[in-house]
Image (cartoon, rainbow, N blue to C red):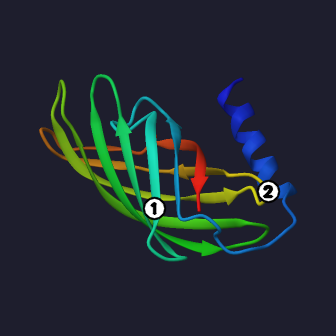
């Protein structure tokens, strides 16, 4: 399935939901698919909520380059089980070109009410400050996670 098909499917799930409720999961684990241009691209995603609004998301990108990222996110309710979120954090790449930098994030988060599944779509630009100075704006991502109460 093409990337546009995946994005369309997730957005359709967002719009078809009719029940509004609070964030009903404490943590989640899954995968975040992203553009290859970003250092933190397709990754394992681990999300943990400290309370209803504040979460930490850890990202592990295996392979070359191996990279780790941490984001602190603020979640705000919108409509129909959809929350928007924003935040920022740091990342580091460890193999090949070792790089360190900052990344921001803004996106939409959806938890299927009757299933332990969560989907999100986001934009996560990266600003590399060590090894080289560069900005990568092409960091769109789509996450699918299993939730833990």
Quarter of the rendering occupied by the N terminus: top right
For the point 69% across and 25% down, the residue is 2
- Disc 2: which residue: 114
For the point 80% across and 50% down, which residue is it? Answer: 13
Residue placed most toward the observer, 120 or 131: 120
Give the left or right position of residue 87, taking residue 65 as reference.
right
Residue 144: x and y, percent? 61, 43
> Which residue of the protein is positioned furthest toward the front in this rendering?
149
Image check: 120 left or right of 1?
left
Q: The residue tagged with tag 2: helix, strand or loop?
A: loop
Q: Position of residue 10 (x, y in %)?
A: 73, 45
Disc 1, SS = strand
Q: Position of residue 118 (x, y in %)?
A: 64, 52
Image height check: is 117 above or below 64? below
Q: Is residue 80 above or below residue 134?
A: below
Tell whether 132 sits left or right of 87: left
- Examine the image and state in which quarter residue 48 appears: bottom left
What residue is disc 1 on? 48
Query: How many discs mark residues in the rendered view?
Result: 2
Q: Nearer the viewer, residue 12 or 51?
A: 51
> Which mark, residue 101?
none
Q: Quick one: label 1, few (<14), some, or many (20+) residues within 10 Å?
A: some
The quarter of the picture where the C terminus appears is: bottom right
């Amino acid at each position: 399935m093409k990337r546009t098909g995946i994005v369309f499917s997730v957005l359709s799930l967002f719009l078809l939901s009719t029940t509004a409720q609070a964030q009903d999961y404490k943590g989640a684990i899954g995968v975040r698919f992203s553009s290859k241009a970003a250092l933190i691209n397709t990754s394992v995603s681990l999300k943990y909520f400290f309370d209803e609004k504040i979460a930490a998301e850890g990202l592990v990108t295996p392979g070359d380059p191996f990279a780790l990222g941490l984001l602190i996110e603020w979640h705000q309710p919108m409509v129909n089980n959809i929350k928007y979120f924003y935040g920022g954090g740091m990342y580091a790449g460890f193999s090949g070109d070792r790089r360190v930098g900052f990344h921001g994030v803004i996106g939409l988060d959806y938890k299927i009410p009757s299933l332990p599944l969560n989907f999100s779509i986001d934009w996560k630009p990266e600003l590399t400050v060590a090894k080289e100075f560069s900005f990568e704006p092409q960091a769109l991502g789509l996450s699918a996670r299993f939730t833990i109460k």
